[in-house]
Image (tube, rainbow, N blue to C red):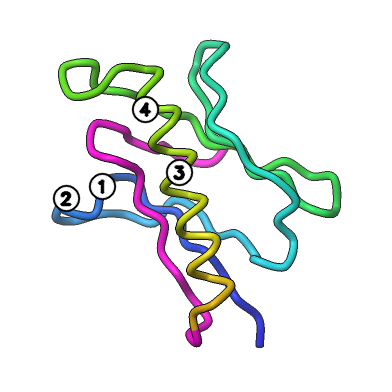
Amino acid sequence: MSKYIYINSFSKVTPNNQNVGVVFLENIRDFECKFTTNPLQFKVYNNSEKTLTWNVSVDNNVISDSNAKTLTDKAFSRTYVNALTDLGSVVEFFPPRGVTIGAQV
């Protein structure tokens, strides 16, 4: 069975969340939240050498950039592990509070 991770824009507690991307689980090679350039970006690397990239914005009144990077990486890692063990075909990824994932670039 094929499995996918849906990428959501806002934290789980945000009403009217929107899906901004989908990642085929079997193609994931690596991922990172890269905060070294502007705009900030979340990247998922897949086996076909294509990089899926989303711009990220951080509300610094809620969370610092460094904490946002760490918590986003941990949240996606948990989602990835859950997707590997979940019986369903879709698992949703929600960024931490204060982090917004924009449209795929």
Q: Residues within 10 Å of mark 2 (few under 14, many from 20)?
A: few
Residue 14, which numbered label?
2
Q: CA distance from mark 3 to mark 4?
A: 10 Å
| Mark with earlier residue (1, 4) | 1
Query: Is the Cβ of the residue at disc 3 closer than 8 Å to that at disc 4?
Result: no
Helix, strand or loop status at disc 1: loop
Residue 68, which numbered label?
4
**Residue 43 in which image quadrant:** top right
What x and y, as percent, mark residue 58? Answer: 32, 23
Give the quadrant of the N terminus. bottom right
The amino acid on which the numbered mark 4 sits, given as a three-letter code, is Ala
What x and y, as percent, mark residue 52? Answer: 65, 43
The reply to whether the magenta stretch includes residue 88 is yes
| Mark with earlier residue (3, 4) | 4
Q: CA distance from mark 2 to mark 4?
A: 17 Å
Q: CA distance from mark 3 to mark 1?
A: 14 Å
- Magenta stretch in the rendered image: 87-105
| Mark with earlier residue (3, 1) | 1
Taking the spot 64% from the left edge, 66% from the top edge, the residue there is 25
Per the image, the residue denoted by label 1 is 11
Helix, strand or loop status at disc 3: helix
Query: Is the Cβ of the residue at disc 2 closer than 8 Å to that at disc 1?
Result: yes
What x and y, as percent, mark residue 62? Answer: 17, 24
The amino acid on which the numbered mark 2 sits, given as a three-letter code, is Thr
Taking the spot 24% from the left edge, 23% from the top edge, the residue there is 63
| Mark with earlier residue (2, 3) | 2
The amino acid on which the numbered mark 3 sits, given as a three-letter code, is Lys
Taking the spot 65% from the left edge, 81% from the top edge, the residue there is 2
Residue 74, which numbered label?
3
**Residue 66 in which image quadrant:** top left
